[in-house]
Structure formats: C-alpha cells, structure tokens
Amino acid sequence: MEHELKEVIKKCDLAIKQEDFDTLMNYYTDDAILVVKPEMIARGKDGIKKAFIAIAKYFNNSIVPTQGEMIILEAGDTALVISQTFLEAESKKDSEYSMERKATYVFKKNAQGEWLCAIDNSYGTDLIK
C-alpha cells in the first residue's frame, strides 16, 4: 500500500506546477521552513509563498517538480521523507543548481490527522560542503 505522504507530495508538486501557491500553503505548518537555495531559508507560510513566487519567476513560470524513488521513515506524528526529486523547466534550460536532487522533507501530523510539511529541503545533504 502506498504511503499517504506520497499523495500529499504529489498534490504539492501539482500546486507548484500550476502556481497555485495558496493551495500549496495548506500543506505547510505555520512555522515551516523552506530551503530556497544553499544559505537561504524562507520561514513561515508568508515567507515560503513569496519564495515560491520568486522561484517560479526564476524558472520563467515553467517549473515542473516530480518525485522518483521515495523512502518514508515514520515515527508517531513525524515523518522523514527522502526523495529523488526532479525539476524540469521548459522555459529555462540553464540553472546554477542541480535539477536532480536527493531531497529531505520533514512532515508532522496535525490534530486532524493531516500531514503538513515542517521542513522542505530539496537540496538534501548537498547543503553540506
């Protein structure tokens, strides 16, 4: 059986592709962080939404994230997701950052039993120099 987090992440990827950032914010905790790029972190839903708008602009509004192999390690109301993440951008062929990543995400279950992203790090351990 597929872990329910795979579906949540798929919905997030679709929201990013469609630039539906209001819907995307429904999948983040209020105090979440997003690693925008090495040494740059967005904090909270407002900061993360602004970051995603800037990311979309950087990729000429053509970014399409998808996930490959995914490992989900769950302990109670917390889950670590290690995922092969692919970024495509038809309107931007060059980027100073890798378009294939080994991402790490941390999700927490809220009181309603919904998984929300607390840490969104598409760079994974590549942050370590």
Image (spheres, grey):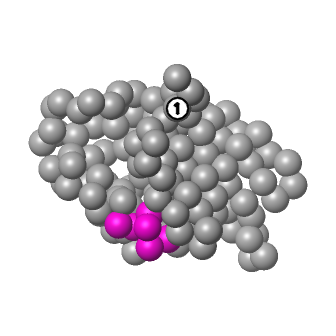
Asked if the magenta segment contains residue 47, the reply would be: yes
Q: Is residue 45 visible?
A: yes
Q: Is residue 67 visible?
A: no
| Label 1, residues with CA under 10 Å away: few <14, some 14-19, many ≥20 | few
Identify the magenta region: 45-50
Determine the residue positioned at 23% across, 32% down.
95
Residue found at the very far top of the displayed protein:
129
Residue 39 vertical position relative to residue 52 in the rendered view, above or below: above
Image location of residue 7, percent across then percent down: 56, 53
- The residue indicated by pointer 1 is 127
In the figure, residue 56 lies in which quadrant?
bottom left
Determine the residue positioned at 74% across, 71% down.
110
Determine the residue positioned at 48% across, 52% down.
41
Q: Nearer the viewer, residue 14 or 51?
A: 51
Image location of residue 55, percent across then percent down: 29, 52
Asked if the magenta segment contains residue 114, the reply would be: no
Q: Give the dominant element type of the magenta stretch: helix, strand or loop.
A: helix
**Kind of element beneath mark 1:** helix
In the figure, residue 117 lies in which quadrant?
bottom right
Three-letter amino acid code at disc 1? Answer: Leu
Residue 115 vertical position relative to residue 59 in the rendered view, above or below: below
Determine the residue positioned at 74% across, 64% down.
109
Left or right side of 76 for 53? left
